[in-house]
Image (spheres, helix red, strand yellow):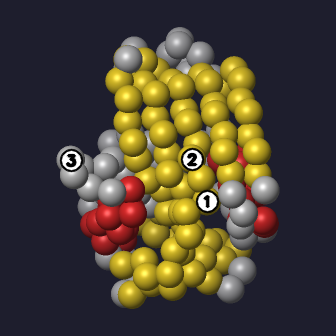
Amino acid sequence: MKTLQTTLLYLLKANQVLLAMKKRGFGVGKYNGVGGKLEVGETVEQAMIRETQEEIGVTPVNYQKHGILQFDMYIKGEHVLEDVHVFTATEFNGEPCESEEMRPTWFAVDKLPLHQMYQTDKIWLPLLLAKRGSLMGSFKFSDDLDSKLVDYKLKVD
């Protein structure tokens, strides 16, 4: 089994959240926050900042870690256990811009494009955006080609 440590950041302003359309690689065609894998020697915060700079050209300066979501899934037949460290940021330097990997767009918090997002996002993201508290969750997916969500636990305070 492969294990991954990744980050996921949502920029917030007024009653809006920044989502980015994935243009290549895993998750292509879906809206998500920005983030990615930790590099050797990086802290979670360093990885979150680096990934945000690379993907949309901004630097988060006032951010909050909300918790960890664990995904037990299969990618191209390989069993993967991914810990996703979830952040929001209310202040950042720079203007979000499109990169080779992501196309950022602001959405009203109550009008998320859930039909163009991961199947788990509709479960936890609206709760996080409403409460902005801590969260802890685990999501288990089937091992077939459809990779359907089969079980989950979620706590949002």
Amino acid at circle 3: Val
Graded by Cα atoms within 10 Å as few (under 14), some (14 to 19) or many (20 or more), the crowding at tag 3 reads few
* Residue projecting furthest to the left: 40
Marks 1 and 3, how far apart at CA: 23 Å
Q: Residue at x 63, y 31 (%)?
A: 139
Report the residue marked by disc 3. Answer: 40
Residue 63 placement (x, y as % from top left): 52, 74
Check residue 111 in the rendering and tell me which mark sits there, or answer none.
none
- Horizontally, residue 120 falls left or right of residue 54, namely right
Marks 3 and 2, how far apart at CA: 20 Å
- For the image, the number of numbered tags is 3
Marks 2 and 1, how far apart at CA: 7 Å
Does residue 19 appear in the picture of this structure? no
Q: Residue at x 50, y 51 (%)?
A: 85
Check residue 66 in the rendering and tell me which mark sits there, or answer none.
1
Q: Quadrant of the C terminus?
A: bottom right
Query: Between disc 1 and disc 3, whose residue precedes?
Result: 3
Query: Between disc 3 and disc 2, whose residue precedes?
Result: 3
- Horizontally, residue 150 falls left or right of residue 52, namely right
Report the residue marked by disc 2. Answer: 68
Q: Residue at x 37, y 51 (%)?
A: 36
Secondary structure under tag 1 reads: strand
Amino acid at circle 1: His
Residue 70 placement (x, y as % from top left): 56, 36
**Which image quadrant is residue 111 in?**
bottom right
Q: Residue at x 46, y 21 (%)?
A: 74
Amino acid at circle 2: Ile
Secondary structure under tag 2 reads: strand
